[in-house]
Amino acid sequence: MKKIDLKSLTINETKEVFLSIGEKSFRAEQVFRWIHGKMIESIDDITVLSKGLRDKLKDTHTIDNLTILQRFDSKEDDTKKYLFKLNDGNIIESVMMEYKHGVTLCLSTQVGCKMGCSFCASTQDGLVRNLTSGEILDQVYQIQKDLDVKVSNIVLMGSGEPLDNYDNVLNFLNILHSEKGQNIGYRHITLSTCGVVPKIKDLAHEDIPITLSISLHTPFDEERKKIMPISRKYSIDEIIEACKYYIERTNRRVTFEYTLIEGVNDRAEDAKELTKILKGLLCHVNLIPLNPIKEFNLKTPKAKYIKEFKDFLDSRGINSTIRREMGSDVNAACGQLRRDYIDTEE
Ligand code: SAH
């Protein structure tokens, strides 16, 4: 029988484990604190439990850990990229960025991705599997231990579509937020999605005020279908409706990510239509200069055009920022590191 990973369990699920083996529920709280607060890596290390109880727990349970395979330190800034090995040999990547307001981590939620966006490296070989809640959490724990830092912000913008791994991502959020664990406020967590409309509505019902970020990338459905296959299922109108609903329920400002690609979505008419569809919405636009992937023939617009695009949004009262490129010397775009690693190993 496969042992259950304690790191993937919420506090309530951990309590059920202890009740089921005839132990008191305060034991579960201790275990939860040691795994998610102290970030210990094996049941043997939970020395607050008696040896007998640890051995009993080990019959049915385990603690899964990621292994740091490689770390790449940017010479341009403090960005660090990690390649992690999972227990089954799969590889994922995460990024640590240091800003004035603290340390931000960009985490993966799946091995690969099935969404098929034409400019994204993560999706080139499709979806391999979902990450468990424990594997998403351990990206945080391993980096904190490696660098001796406390993370203050989390963005789910690494490989994978978080809303395609809904239950594990929700458990991850619950555990990360717990005051008995890392106690990271929901307002410091951003979930980015290509626009899985029914799941955006589900998320609105969870009563967790995280920041929702939509990868929009063009205001035209026809263009979006060409670069983001998910658009064949859900229209931009439906996405905007879902965002309105999310804002209504959570009172949170929604972010729209807009990766600027030369000749594809950087024209004056794109900027104009974008301001039309976002008018009156509590939102912010994050303009991301394309990070070119070697296999794709797509280019980043010249800085001058990116600035013009932003100026137009400003002129129509739509808040926006141009994302600063960080760590481009250590292979910035999500999915690139993992693919390069797999390519060199083969
Ligand atoms: N699946 C989720 C989260 C992962 S992608 C989503 O689609 O939002 C995180 C962000 O990086 C998305 O906005 C995505 O469109 C963007 N992105 C992917 N590849 C990129 C590239 N080569 N250059 C710039 N941005 C990219």
Image: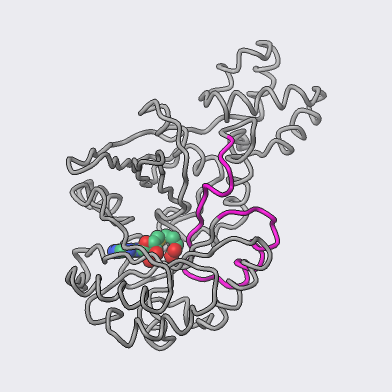
Range covered by the magenta-colored residues: 183-210
Q: How many marks?
A: 0
Quadrant for ligand 1 reads: bottom left
Asked if the magenta segment contains residue 72, the reply would be no
Residue 203 lies in quadrant = bottom right
Q: Is residue 316 above or below residue 62?
A: below
Provide residue 161's location: percent of width, then percent of height: 48, 61
At 60% from the left and 23% from the top, the residue drawn is 34
Q: Nearer the viewer, residue 151 or 123?
A: 151
At 28% from the left and 37% from the top, the residue drawn is 70
- 259 left or right, relative to 204: left
- 300 left or right, relative to 333: left
Any part of residue 346 in sight = no
Provide residue 53's location: percent of width, then percent of height: 70, 16
- 156 left or right, relative to 250: left
Asked if the magenta segment contains residue 192, the reply would be yes
- 188 left or right, relative to 313: right
At 43% from the left and 77% from the top, the residue drawn is 229
Provide residue 182's location: percent of width, then percent of height: 56, 33
Residue 308 lies in quadrant = bottom left
At 80% from the left and 31% from the top, the residue drawn is 20
Provide residue 234's location: percent of width, then percent of height: 53, 80
